[in-house]
Amino acid sequence: MVTMVSARDMRKERGLGLVRINPLVRLGELTFSADDDTLAREVHALLDPAATVRLNGSELDGPGYLRHVFELRSTMSGGTIAVVDEIQDDRGPAGAFAARVVVRMKMKDGSLLTGESHLVGRAGDDGRVTRMVEIGRLLEDSDSPAEAGPMTAGSRILFPQE
């Protein structure tokens, strides 16, 4: 089970200590784990009201991003997200962060899709995302394992596929 966290307290217990959760990764986690009400509440908590979100060149505001996630979820029956690379500025709540994730989605029509996304963002003084850019692509069977996001010791699989 995933513990829901707010933008003001983006820390989660892991083993012996607390680790700051990259808000971009958290948005991805919510796509697969949260019910609709929790998703809407957490997206509003994570995104600054004036946030700009760019998805593969299309610019959205917070409500537009939430509509995008709801539309995506309406076509899926399950999935996983694996963090391959992650970096963030830990000097305080404001700062920059980035992540590379591999997403595996089981669609309602029975097909399986695998994609890779590169996410870059910036947070304001209160820790909420003020700007996010996501560039993604679907992976083909012919893509090399390195392109598909190797599951190395540093990788974190966040959600098992159902």
Image (cartoon, rainbow, N blue to C red):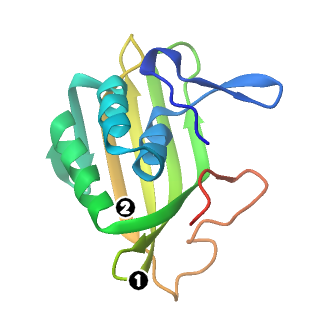
1 lies above or below 68: above
Relative to the observer, which residue lies in front, 129 or 40? 40
Quarter of the image where the N terminus is located: top right
Residue at the location (16% across, 43% down)? Answer: 64
The image quarter in which residue 27 lies: top left
Residue at the location (46% across, 83% down)? Answer: 140
Which residue, as the protein is rendered here, is positioned at the far bottom?
A: 142
Spatial CA distance of label 1 from label 2 is 22 Å
How many numbered tags mark residues here? 2
In this figure, which residue is indicated by the disc labeled 1?
110
Which residue, as the protein is rendered here, is positioned at the far right?
A: 16
Relative to the observer, which residue lies in front, 81 or 57? 81
21 lies above or below 78: above
The amino acid type of the residue labelled 2 equals Gly
The image shows residue 130 at horizontal and vertical percentages of 29, 26
In this figure, which residue is indicated by the disc labeled 2?
136
Residue at the location (39% across, 35% down)? Answer: 121
